[in-house]
Amino acid sequence: MYSQTVLTALLAWPVVAAAAVLLVPERWAKHVALAASLAEFAISVPLWWTFQPAAGMQFVLDLPWIPAWGIRYTVGVDGISLFMVLLTTFLVPLSVLGSYAYITTRERGFYALMLVLTSGMIGVFVSLDLFLFYVMWEVMLIPMYFIIGVWGGERRLYAAIKFFIYTFFGSLLMLVAILVLVALVGQRTGYYSFSYAYLTAHLGGLGPAAFWLFGAFFLAFAIKVPMFPFHTWLPDAHVEAPTAGSVILAGVLLKMGTYGFLRFALPLFPAVALHPAIQAAIVALSLIGIVYGGLVAMVQPDFKKLIAYSSVAHLGFVMLGIWALTLQSVQGALLVMINHGISTGALFFLAGMLYERRHSRLIDAFGGIAKVVPLLAAALTIVSLSAIGLPATNGFVGEFLVLLGAFPTYPRAAIVAAAGVIVAAMYLLPALQRVIYNPLDKHENEKLSDLSPREIAVLVPLLACIVWIGVYPAPILRRMEPAAQHLIQSVRLDAATFTATR
C-alpha cells in the first residue's frame, strides 16, 4: 500500500498542512509548519530503502484525470528523480527551522506558502504526465514569487517580478510545445495523450518540428537552471529572497531545469539533443557558465551575490555532465545537483546567520570573527571547502565524475571545466579569509554571538551529508546507476534510429 500511495501523500500532505497553518494562531504557525515538514520528510525516508536499484519507474500510481483530453494522474520515481524528492523533503524542514528568527511578520502566510511550494516542487519531480508536470511547474512559481516579493530585501519587488517574468515566459513556450507535441503524435497515432511513456514510445516522424519543440523545452529549462546567458534573474532573486527562499531556490528550484533536461528534453527529442551543432552549443554555454560564473563571483562585495554566481558555475558542470552522456558524467551531474543543494544551501544558511547578527551582507563588514564565533567559522570553513570540491567532501565526488565522464567525449571542454574548479577556489577562499580569518578590526564584530542550538540543529544535518557523500557515495551511486544507464542507452539508440531512418 505504501508503494502506491507514498508519492500522492507527499503531494497532498503539505497542502493540507498549509491550510492548518493558516488556521492556527500566528505564534504557532512556525511550529506547525516545522512539524508538518518533518512529517513530510518522515513519509519520504522509506523511499530510500524500499527503492530497488533498477531501471524503470517505481511507486507508480496511474489514474484517469481528464480522460477526454488524454490527461492522467500518473506519478512515479526512478533513480534520477528519487534523490530530487529526498533532497526537497530534507531541505524544507531545515529551511523552516532556519526561518524562526528571520521571519517576524505575516508568519502564517510565509509558512503556508513554504508548504505549498513543497508540493509544487515534489510534483515536478514525480509527474509522468506532461500536463501534470506543467501544472506543478506553475504551482511552484507562485509561492516563490510571494516569498521573495513579501519577505525579501529592499529590492524585493523588482527581484520577484524579474524572477516571475523570466520563468513564466519560458514555461509558456514549454506549454505550447507540449500541446504541439501531443497534437502531432495524436494525429499520427490516432490517440491523444499527455503520457510521458506514450509520447516517448512514439517519437519518430516529428521532422523539422522537433527542433522547434526542443528549442521551447530548452528555453524553459535553461532559464530555470539558469544557463548563461539566461541567468540574470538569479543574482537578484537570491540576494533579495529571505534565507529560506535562497536555500530552496538554490537547493531545489534550479535543479528543476537540469532535471527537465534529463527527464524530458533528452528522451523526447534525442536526435535534436545529440545533433552535433546542438551539442557544441550547449557544451560551449556550459563552459562559459563555469568560467564566467566564477570570474564574476570573484569581484562581488555582497556575500549572497557571490554564492548566487557560484551557482551559475556549479550548474554549468551539471549541463556538461548531462550532454557528455556517459555513465560517469550523468551520475556526476546528478551528484553535483544533490551536492549543490546541500553545500550551497548551507552557505545561504550561514550567510543568513551572519546577516541576522550584523544586518549586512557585505564581505567587508566582517573580518576576524573566527575568534568571536568559532563554531560558525568552523561550519563556514567546512562548507566552503565542500563548495570548491575539496577531496573527502561531497563537492569533489560529483565534479570528479563529471570531468572523468566528459573527458572521452569532450577532452578540451573537460580541461576548461577543470580550470573552473581553480576559479572556484579563487573566489571562495579569499572571501572566507576576509570574513572570518583576517584581523578583527571592527568593534561591531567583537560581541557577535556564536551559533545557537537551533542554528546548530540546522547545520549539523548538512555537514553530516557533506562528509558522508564525500567519503562514501556508493549507496547513492548504486541507486541511480540503472536509471542513468537506461537513459543513456535509450537516448543514443533513439537518436541513432531516427538518423538511420531519415
Image (cartoon, rainbow, N blue to C red):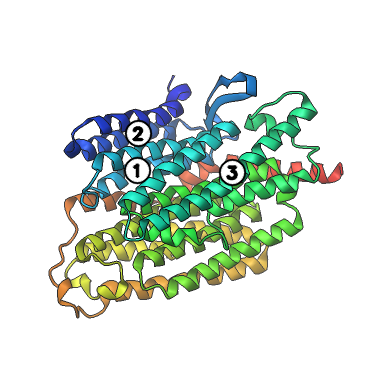
Local secondary structure at mark 2: helix
Marks 3/1 in contact by CB < 8 Å: the verdict is: no
Residue receiving disc 1: 92
Indicate the position of residue 124 as horizontal and vertical percent values: 50, 38
The residue that disc 3 covers is 172
473 to 188, vertically: above or below: below
Q: Nearer the viewer, residue 209 or 414?
A: 209
Q: Secondary structure at mark 3?
A: helix
**Residue 418: horizontal and vertical position, in percent?**
55, 69
Query: Which mark sits nearer the N-terminus, 3 or 1?
Result: 1
Is there CB contact under 8 Å for labels 3 and 2?
A: no
Quadrant of the drawing holding the C terminus = top right
Mark 1 residue crowding within 10 angstroms, few (<14) / some (14–19) / many (20+): many
Q: Is residue 324 above or below residue 145?
A: below
Q: Who's the residue at 66% across and 66% down the image?
A: 411
Q: Is residue 486 visible?
A: no
Q: Residues within 10 Å of mark 3 (few under 14, many from 20)?
A: some
Disc with the residue nearer the chain's start (3 vs 2): 2
Q: Residue at x 26, y 39 (%)?
A: 108
Of the numbered discs 1 and 2, the one sitting upstream in the chain is: 2
- Residue at 16% x, 66% y is 448
The CA span between labels 3 and 2 is 30 Å
